[in-house]
Image (tube, rainbow, N blue to C red):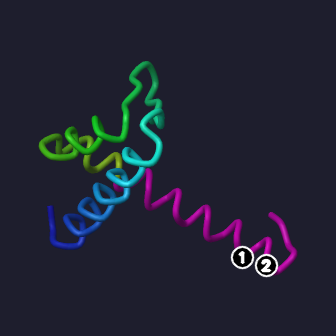
Amino acid sequence: MNQIEKALIDEIKKTLGRVADSNPAWRLVLGTETLSATEIIKKLGNDKKFQRFVLTHYVGLAVEIEQKAREKIEGTSG
C-alpha cells in the first residue's frame, strides 16, 4: 500500500471511529455480511483485499456525492 492509500485508509478509520461513537447501530451490508463501523476498522488493519474494496467503494461514493451536490447547486440533473 502506498502512502496515499495509507492516508486514505487512516482517514476512513478516523471517520468510522466517529460513526461508531455517535451511531453504534450503523452497519455496512456487503452481500451476506454485515459489519459495524468498529468491525470495519479492525478488518482494515490486516485485510489487504478488504482495504482495496473500501478505498474503491468510498472514493467512488465521495465522487458521486460531490456530483450530486454540484447538480443540486447548479440546478441540473443527469
Examine the residues drawn in magenta and state their main secondary structure: helix
Q: Position of residue 15 (x, y in %)?
A: 37, 58
**From the image, which quarter does the N terminus lie in?**
bottom left
* Mark seen at residue 73: 2
Furthest toward the bottom, the residue is 74
Q: Position of residue 31 (x, y in %)?
A: 46, 24
Residue placed at 55% from the left, 66% from the top? Answer: 63
**From the image, which quarter does the C terminus lie in?**
bottom right
Residue placed at 71% from the left, 66% from the top? Answer: 68
Residue placed at 26% from the left, 59% from the top? Answer: 9
Q: Is residue 73 above or below residue 6?
A: below
Region rendered in magenta: 55-78
The reply to whether discs 1 and 2 touch (Cβ–Cβ < 8 Å) is: yes
State left or right for residue 18 relative to residue 52.
right
Quick one: label 1, few (<14), some, or many (20+) residues within 10 Å?
Answer: few
Quick one: label 2, few (<14), some, or many (20+) residues within 10 Å?
Answer: few
The image quarter in which residue 13 lies = bottom left
